[in-house]
Image (spheres, rainbow, N blue to C red):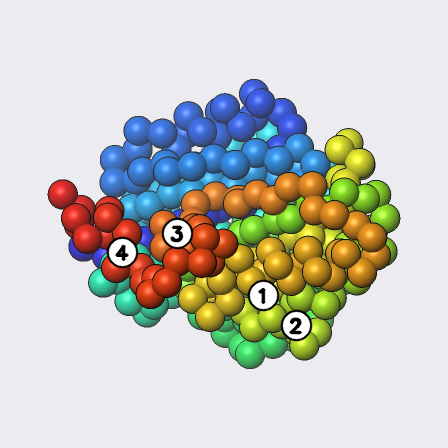
Amino acid sequence: MAWLECVPNVSEGRDPRVLDRMTARLTGRTGVRLLDVHRDADHHRSVFTLAGEAPALTAAVLDLCAEALDAIDLRHHAGAHPRIGAVDVVPFVPLGRTTMDEAVAAARATGRAIAERFGIPVLLYEEAATAPHRRRLEQVRRGRFEGLADKLRTPDWAPDFGPAAPHPSFGAVAVGARGILVAYNINLATERLEVGTAVARAVRASSGGLPHVKAMALPLPARRLVQVSMNLTNVEITPIAVVFDAVAREAARYGVAIAESEVVGLVPAAALADVAARYLRVAGWSPDKILDSRLGPD
């Protein structure tokens, strides 16, 4: 059985009625398990974590798009997180013995189905991308919903599926295949966005910081904080504890402390166990010391 994780990100984090309807559409579906729902009012975004086989996941994503099409209008949407679509991004992640090729096939089949059913433009990214410049999600999202019409008119950014113009209220959706990542945010005890921007620049890989770290700064005005929002794409090479220490160190240069941190969605047990082991200075640590992993699925 080709078992996949699918993590749709939806541009709604404030209306519980909409999110409850979306959750209901995903709950109890044959062949799909809804593992987690993360709602964020500041980001105005929610993350659904699903697992199942490819055809069932495609059907679930189509249900989510149908609900979003009825409930979300990006022309009247404002949140801290960048977005191009009401259902903004749909990554497929291979689990167990499932191959990346199978995840790519699921992503492309889902993207084609979204375009055919709803007339929404679809851009493929990461391992499913059709050109090197379209692999990185941050490049796909550049310009956001507000600049999407101009972007899709350029030859380099013609949609992989669907029309060459955004849906008026929905926008477009990025569908891709990738490995497991940890979405990890650290909130700084300051309202100074320039501090968060400097910290994010210092720690992200593209600026010469930590390997396999993507980072950006976002304001959280309701909480009077600034967030360093990160995707950690390989926590074996760059563990969460290393990222936390680096952010704390860079923030301290500006006299700013860490208020809190959060994990968005789910995280492998070994990644959090590694954090505990590093801070407790456990000698001879290895993931084999995790009881649950030694016991196996039974």
Q: Earlier in the sequence, mark 4 or mark 2?
A: 2
- Tell me the distance, in whole angstroms, between the alpha carbons under discs 3 and 2: 24 Å
Mark 2: few, some, or many residues within 10 Å (few <14, many ≥20)?
some
Picture layout, residue 40 above or below residue 248: above
Residue 56 placed where, x, y %?
A: 30, 44
Mark 1: few, some, or many residues within 10 Å (few <14, many ≥20)?
many
Disc 2: which residue: 209
The kind of residue tagged 4 is Lys
Disc 3: which residue: 273
Q: Are marks 1 and 2 in contact (CB under 8 Å)?
A: yes
Kindly report which numbered mark, 1 or 4, lies closer to the viewer in this rendering.
4
The residue at the point 55 percent across, 79 percent down is 132
Q: Are marks 4 and 3 in contact (CB under 8 Å)?
A: yes
The residue at the point 56 percent across, 20 percent down is 17
Mark 4: few, some, or many residues within 10 Å (few <14, many ≥20)?
few
Disc 1: which residue: 213
